[in-house]
Amino acid sequence: MTCKPKVLTFDVVGTLIDFENGMKNALLKILGKEGKTLDFEAFLTEYRALRNRPDKMLFPEDLAPIYLILAEKFSLPTGQGEEKAFVQSATSWPAFNDSVEALKRLQKHFHLVAMTNARRWAFDGMDKTLEYPFFKGFTVDESGFEKPDPQYFSYVLEQLAPHGYTKEDVLHVAQSQFHDIGIARELGYTVCWIERRKAVGGGFGGTVAVQELTTPDYHYHTLAELADAADRGELVMVA
């Protein structure tokens, strides 16, 4: 017997919020006319290599040292607080074009829950950009852990338990194979991979790479496709 999910848990940055274009916009604002020469794909490759350092700060505050490390290589200005502006830009990064509408459609079928490695102050800006779609929202500040740590997922389940929800009710939706899809599948969740980079030719972009992709239960390239499947009643728990 199959059952439908009751809760959709979402990674936010990269799945709902277009952090790559958000960072690009911030860099272009800092660089001004000089931004025309920026090789942003090369910047993303270097950025990705720095994202998972053992000594890294919490996201998005870790963007400050990353900016300073990459400043010399990409001729980025320093000395006037540019790295702080780069960090603060996270509160105004854009949503993907389909995120707001698709989330409104998904709200008709499920409770929506945010699970982000971002700090609360940054998530609050993202939540506003998404027009406050979430039943519950959890950040690294509340959980005390960063995905892919299994303890983050355990924390969220503990918070959902008083509302009558268990893992068997949850479909986890994310873009990052490293932070979400692999570990969630390993933990026994039904998972949906939103392959956002497909639109720009694939690859990992600014997301930490994995050596081998985890096969998800559901695989879409946009959030609108997920909402279409939900409207058709096609989403069931299969983990």
Image: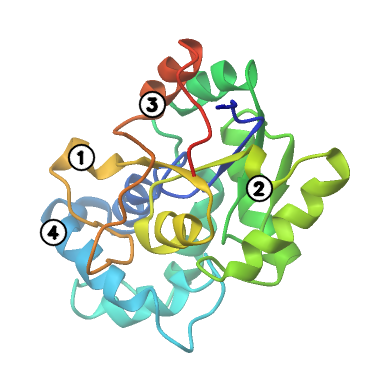
Q: Is mark 1 on a helix, strand or loop?
A: helix
Give the amino acid type for the residue marked by disc 3 in the picture.
Answer: Asn
Q: Can residue 76 be seen in this view?
A: no
Q: Quadrant of residue 203?
A: bottom left
| Most foreground residue, 130 or 155 | 155
Q: Quadrant of residue 179?
A: bottom left
| Most foreground residue, 235 or 96 | 235
Residue 71, placed above or below residue 102: below
Q: Which of marks 1 and 3 is in front?
A: 1
Residues tagged 3 and 4 counted as in contact (Cβ below 8 A): no
Q: Which mark is residue 39?
A: 4
In 3D space, how far apart are the residues under numbered discs 1 and 4 (Cα atoms)? 19 Å
In 3D space, how far apart are the residues under numbered discs 3 and 4 (Cα atoms)? 23 Å
Q: How crowded is mark 2: few (under 14 residues within 10 Å), some or many (20 or more)?
A: many
Left or right for 196, reference 85: left
Q: Is mark 2 on a helix, strand or loop?
A: helix
Q: What element carries label 3?
A: loop
Q: Which of marks 3 and 4 is in front?
A: 3
Q: Looking at the picture, how far across and down is residue 210, in whole percent? A: 27, 67
Q: How crowded is mark 1: few (under 14 residues within 10 Å), some or many (20 or more)?
A: few
Residues tagged 1 and 2 counted as in contact (Cβ below 8 A): no
Q: Name the residue under label 1.
A: 198
N-term mark: 1 or 2: 2
Q: Which mark is residue 167?
A: 2
Q: Looking at the picture, how far across and down is residue 195, in whole percent? A: 30, 42
Q: Nearer the viewer, mark 3 or mark 2?
A: 2
